[in-house]
């Protein structure tokens, strides 16, 4: 096909799903919008309208003057603890008021058994507990204080601080609490390895890359921040830690992991034999790589662990305190702090692009006109933040033109294949195809999404074919999230975008995506959710894509997913799923109801024609009755995922924009009206020439 997507947008801009007088709907693509819903005794239309309007007005009131929305992003207590430890390492003074607020935040989240959890309602975790205890000691908490005694007893009861994960062990090494030799071998000569080698930086995920490279510098120099005896945590060890040699032990019946453990020990013995010349060359390369990715205001990778490692690396390399790169890096970390009066915490990163595109979609479905000033400001802000410069992802697609959105305010090296489709769909809802000036950017961004498809038919978050699963066996990767393979949730989202642009199931990228989704569907009918908790999130994302594509919803694999979602509905009419389902899949779809997970289930069910079902009516009732008088939904439970089993997130916006979105779509569909997404979706496939890089692979 010679016709470009850009030209096709011009041709098909007028071909929307909004029905004009005398136009007949296409039954193959219209889903259950044939007429008003039957009456329900659970809620009145007036009540539904009131809840939507209250939430919608609140969203318009809290929009930033520049056009974006941003909500707090909260992890567990390890991030604020690491912030405090970082200040100690750098020799920076922390204001007494801030120290007090962070201390209160940490103490308030301690469990009765003395530990600290990875998420609200979770069990105590030894690594999180050791870091938090360590952070509190730096804040001046006495080890004889009741909460510290309880924490110490909890940690010792689990075997002591020798049982912590690798990242916590590295933190302990930085402060002289364990020997550096107990950390996994990470020779800085990794920077010199060829791409064909079994380990290379391009074979791991973006987040691993940005954490590892500055860490290689630290590992090569092995700095120790000297602490007084009263500042350390030797009391958390069952045995004296300075006698430790190896803390990574062989695993029965796991040949690959054991081979990597042997390799780790060989590398540690060989480390003194590495030539100084190659070490210096590798160090210069790691330094240059790190500094290049620190140039933006968001810091390297725009994620706290990488940012913290980077400023420590520059500090150890001798950068003066007033060096622009070091100053900018520290400021980026300080900008992650959130002050809530009595308490304060450090965010793992910020989420303005994600929050803005989801908020924009929600208010547009809620009836805010595309011409509204708030919508136009959001459009302008999002388009201003389109990344059109090369990034690390180009290693796999050198001919693909850059055009994507990141998650944060600034993260130019790492646009996100999850955010980009969601941003484009929000902009399409806002009517950007009617604006000639914006079509060029949209076409480039769609091209980029297609070009980022992996060879298995799915899409990962930041890279192509980042699926070298054997690397999750190296000792450094005990968190099990070193890689960025294709996932169901992102694949469903990419299919939804392409279907919204009029492409059908025969379009090669969609056909490949559908094959991938069928292969990875769980036996119960659900799909795994990599970036949200968990199977409810993944199933929503896939069903939205299948529904937008116009797939026959009577197909067994779709009905199996629908039946599974319905079976998970709680007696209180909502849906919920515990983070523990990542560890125990039998808990898929089980947990205390939350507004966000209920909204995901509803959006998924409505996408495949279940608008008038009893399950949907009850779910809508749940959301209506949970809203407070200020138009908010209270959601303390963590429903976002950083790394399954290791790191979870509480998106403070999830319990706000997702319920508004679900209620608004329901209101439209139950009355026989099209959703805003229906109104702007193209009904004919646009001509498209695949990116050159896609043709070659």
Image: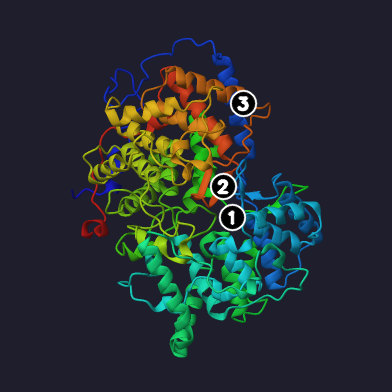
Mark 2 vs mark 1: which is more N-terminal?
1
Q: Is residue 527 left or right of residue 102?
A: left
* Quadrant of res 505: top left
Q: For the point 34% across and 59% down, which residue is it?
A: 401
| The label number, if any, that marks residue 348 in the structure image | 1
The residue tagged 2 is 649
Q: Is mark 2 in CB contact (under 8 Å) with mark 1?
A: yes
Contact between marks 3 and 2 (CB within 8 A): the answer is: no
Query: In the image shown, does 405 or 465 lie closer to the viewer?
Result: 465
Placement of 276 over or under 298, stated as above or below: below
Q: Name the spot of residue 46 as percent of width and height, x first.
A: 57, 15
User: Which comes before the other along the chain, label 3 or label 2?
Assistant: 3
Q: Is residue 227 left or right of residue 553?
A: right
Secondary structure at badge 1 equals loop
Of residues 218 and 604, the one nearer the viewer is 218
Judged left or right of residue 48, residue 502 is left
Using the numbered discs, state the Cα–Cα distance from disc 3 to disc 2 in whole angstroms. Answer: 22 Å
Quarter placement of the C terminus: bottom left
Nearer to the camera, 412 or 554: 554
x and y, in percent, of residue 547 in the image = 34, 31
Measure how far apart labels 3 and 1 are at the Cα level: 29 Å
Colour convention of the picture: rainbow
Q: Secondary structure at mark 3?
A: helix
Against 289, is 365 above or below? Answer: above
Q: CA distance from mark 2 to mark 1?
A: 9 Å
**Tally of marks:** 3
Asked if residue 390 can be seen in this view, the reply is no
Q: Residue at x 50, y 26 (%)?
A: 664
Q: Where does residue 440 sit, x and y in percent of width and height?
A: 36, 50
Q: Which residue is mark 3?
A: 626
């Amino acid at each position: 096909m010679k016709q470009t997507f850009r030209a096709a947008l011009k041709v098909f801009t007028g071909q929307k799903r909004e029905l004009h007088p005398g136009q007949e709907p296409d039954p193959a693509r219209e889903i259950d919008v044939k007429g008003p819903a039957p009456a329900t005794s659970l809620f009145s239309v007036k009540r539904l309208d009131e809840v939507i309007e209250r939430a919608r007005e609140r969203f318009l009131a809290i929009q930033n003057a520049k056009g974006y929305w941003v909500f707090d992003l909260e992890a567990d207590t390890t991030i604020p603890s690491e912030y405090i430890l970082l200040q100690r390492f750098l020799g920076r003074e922390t204001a007494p008021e801030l120290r007090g607020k962070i201390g209160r935040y940490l103490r308030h989240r301690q469990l009765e058994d003395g530990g600290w959890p990875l998420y609200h309602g979770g069990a105590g975790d030894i690594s999180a507990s050791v870091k938090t205890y360590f952070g509190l000691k730096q804040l001046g908490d006495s080890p004889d204080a009741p909460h510290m005694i309880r924490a110490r007893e909890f940690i010792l009861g689990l075997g002591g601080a020798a049982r912590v994960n690798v990242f916590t062990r590295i933190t302990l090494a930085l402060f002289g609490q364990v020997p550096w030799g107990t950390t996994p071998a990470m020779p800085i000569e990794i920077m010199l390895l060829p791409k064909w080698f079994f380990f290379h930086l391009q074979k791991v995920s973006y987040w691993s890359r940005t954490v590892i490279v500055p860490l290689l510098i630290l590992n090569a120099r092995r700095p120790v921040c000297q602490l007084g005896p009263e500042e350390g945590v030797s009391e958390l060890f069952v045995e004296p830690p300075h006698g430790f040699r190896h803390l990574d032990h062989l695993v029965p019946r796991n040949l690959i992991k054991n081979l990597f453990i042997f390799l780790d020990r060989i590398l540690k013995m060989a480390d003194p034999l590495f030539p100084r010349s190659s070490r210096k060359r590798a160090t210069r390369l790691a330094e240059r790589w790190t500094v290049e990715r620190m140039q933006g205001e968001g810091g390297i990778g725009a994620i706290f662990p990488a940012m913290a490692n980077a400023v420590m690396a520059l500090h150890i390399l001798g950068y003066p305190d007033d060096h622009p790169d070091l100053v900018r890096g520290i400021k980026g970390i300080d900008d992650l702090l959130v002050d809530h009066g009595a308490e304060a915490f450090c965010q793992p990163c910020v989420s303005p692009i994600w929050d803005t595109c989801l908020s924009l979609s929600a208010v547009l479905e809620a009836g805010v006109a595309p011409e509204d000033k708030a919508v136009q400001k959001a459009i302008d802000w999002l388009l201003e933040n389109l990344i059109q410069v090369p990034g690390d992802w180009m290693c796999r697609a050198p001919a693909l033109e850059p055009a994507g959105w990141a998650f944060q305010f600034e993260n130019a090296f790492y646009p996100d294949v999850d955010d980009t489709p969601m941003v484009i769909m929000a902009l399409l809802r806002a009517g950007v195809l009617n604006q000639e000036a914006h079509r060029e950017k949209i076409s480039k961004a769609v091209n980029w999404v297609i070009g980022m498809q992996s060879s298995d038919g799915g899409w990962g978050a930041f890279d192509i074919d980042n699926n070298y699963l054997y690397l999750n066996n190296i000792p450094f990767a005990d968190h099990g999230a070193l890689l960025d393979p294709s996932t169901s949730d992102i694949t469903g989202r990419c299919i939804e975008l392409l279907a919204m642009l009029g492409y059908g199931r025969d379009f090669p990228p969609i056909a490949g995506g559908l094959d991938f989704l069928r292969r990875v569907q769980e036996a119960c009918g659900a799909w795994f959710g990599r970036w949200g908790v968990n199977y409810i999130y993944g199933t929503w994302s896939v069903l939205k894509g299948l529904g937008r594509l116009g797939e026959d919803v009577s197909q067994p694999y779709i009905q199996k997913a629908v039946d599974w979602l319905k079976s998970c509905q709680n007696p209180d009419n909502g849906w919920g799923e515990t983070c523990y389902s990542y560890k125990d899949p039998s808990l898929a779809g089980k947990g205390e109801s939350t507004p966000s997970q209920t909204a995901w289930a509803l959006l998924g069910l409505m996408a495949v024609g279940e608008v008038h079902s009893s399950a949907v009516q009850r779910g809508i009732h749940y959301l209506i009755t949970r809203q407070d008088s200020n138009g908010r939904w209270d959601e303390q439970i963590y429903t976002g995922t950083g790394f399954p089993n290791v790191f979870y997130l509480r998106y403070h916006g999830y319990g706000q924009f997702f319920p508004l979105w679900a209620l608004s779509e329901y209101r439209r569909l139950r009355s026989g009206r099209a959703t805003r997404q229906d109104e702007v979706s193209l009904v004919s496939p646009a001509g498209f020439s695949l990116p050159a890089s896609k043709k070659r692979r």
